[in-house]
Image: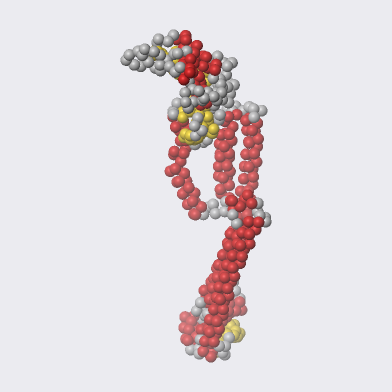
Amino acid sequence: MLQAKFGLTTPEERVLRIRNTLRNFTQEDVQEPLKLVPVIRYNQPGKLIVMNDKPVMLLAQGDLDEGDDLTLDQAANRVLARMEAQRTALRDQYNSRWLALSAVKSTAGLLALVAFWYGSYRSWRWVKRLYRRRILENRSWIPQSWRRFIGAIETRLYALLTILLGIMALYVWLSWAFSLFPWTRVWGASLGDWSVRVLQEIAISMVSALPGLMIVLIIFLLTAFILKLLKAVLNQVAEGRLQLPGIHPETVGATRKLISVVVWLFALSAAYPFLPGANSLAFKGISVFFGLMLTLGSAGVMNHAMSGLVLIYSRALRKGDVIRVADNEGLVSEIGMLATKIITRENYVVTVPNAVVVSGKITNLSAQNDGGGINLTVSVTIGYDTPWRQVHAMLELAARRALGIDQDQPPLVRQLSLMDWYIAYELQVRLIPGQSLAAARNELHSHIQDVFNEFNVQIMSPNFVMQPEGSVTVAKENWYSAPAVPPDGNKK
């Protein structure tokens, strides 16, 4: 920008004159470098830029911008450098030998780039074979047990390194090839400036993020220390060495998980402002996206989770209890936050959602027995023609014969109801701790049939029109009809 006025010549007229001068230069003039000559015009010091001893433009003290804070020499040298770059590009543009040499150089550079890519690919194949052989021979530094999770990690890392180096080599070749030709020289300069600017921004961002990362690290270390302290206290409660109001040994696991979630959420909330890029629009958009997903998908999950907390803190169930929920009866193997797992008598694992468990009726068969035994009840229906005292005695005899029954607890027989054609009896016994409910029920049913057949009492419910002439029983000699085998193993 020219601002000085020489006599009657305005800055606008000076610009037009310089433009016309540049248009009149010949190819021979362009071959000569620009020079800077100090002159004095109208009692004003100036710097005259000449090319092939022909004046190009005059820069005076009045042309300087006060905001740039430059001297006349500094401003003249800056203008000279810019015009020299343009003169060099213009000279190269009409130099066929230079263009041909630049084409040869760029082609040679491209061949070198392709050779580098091919060599990288071959070296990756060699590294792949090498580590495959080392893994088979178990001579690698990484333990063999880790290989199932990470595989040939060395080969993948080397492949990633070769890809990055290949991309960098392509970038360098493009920047160099563009700088060879006058028409694309500005692109080469832009690529170089862009890479330097990106590296500078990355370095500045890393350095500026260090204080925030240190604060985040301190917050997480304090959080981990607090959780370890809470874990030590809750372990004392679980072992019965310490008593805290509202916390029982069976609820320690759920309490630890809840406290961990709350503490970590608080730590994340405190560390969020110090994370790099926390205030960026991308970070905020991701937070909104995950919040929307959590809001839309957490209704059913939260229902089961809250039901699991009700089960745990109400202590209605404990791990190891034998329960009956709907059509499922078995041993509680796990009470999770979302579901309860039951091992049935068929050795099936039934997963029942906690919301279903809470909404239905839960029968805990082992909650009231301190010794660990389970109460087992079986029912039979016997006609009115059989004395009830005899039925009581036979049921008690079957209970004494059955294995797995706690004989220290006398069996209990109840008459539940007097029906139209028969009486409903119930036998209740206590099982030995650790005895399988399904096996004990099968054992007791077998002895009840044997005892009733032994005393010639009909166990079939007499719901009929006409009374049979004889009792519907199985004679003792027919107890082990083929293919059944008696306990001594001798077939009859």
The x and y percentages for residue 113 are: 57, 73
Query: Looking at the rendering, which quadrant does residue 74 occupy?
Result: bottom right
User: Which of the two residues, 266 or 325, is positioned nearer the viewer here?
Assistant: 325
User: Which of the two residues, 341 or 203, is positioned nearer the viewer here?
Assistant: 341
Asked if 97 appears above or below 301 in the picture, the reply is below
Left or right: where 151 falls relative to 420: right
Q: Residue at x 48, y 84 (%)?
A: 19
Taking the view exactly as shown, the residue that stands out farthest to the front is: 492
Asked if 256 appears above or below 243 in the picture, the reply is below
Color encoding of the figure = secondary structure
User: Which of the two residues, 318 or 315, is positioned nearer the viewer here?
Assistant: 318
- The number of numbered discs placed on residues in the rendered structure image is 0
Asked if 460 appears above or below 312 in the picture, the reply is above
Q: Is residue 160 visible?
A: yes
Asked if 116 appears above or below 220 in the picture, the reply is below
Query: Looking at the rendering, which quadrant does residue 198 occupy?
Result: bottom right
Taking the view exactly as shown, the residue that stands out farthest to the left is: 465
User: Which of the two residues, 492 or 50, is positioned nearer the viewer here?
Assistant: 492
Q: Residue at x 60, y 55 (%)?
A: 209
Q: Residue at x 67, y 56 (%)?
A: 139
Q: Residue at x 56, y 21 (%)?
A: 403
The x and y percentages for residue 124 are: 59, 65
The x and y percentages for residue 210 are: 63, 54
Q: Is residue 196 visible?
A: no
Left or right: where 455 falls relative to 61: left
Query: Looking at the rendering, which quadrant does residue 61 occupy?
Result: bottom right
The x and y percentages for residue 223 are: 62, 42
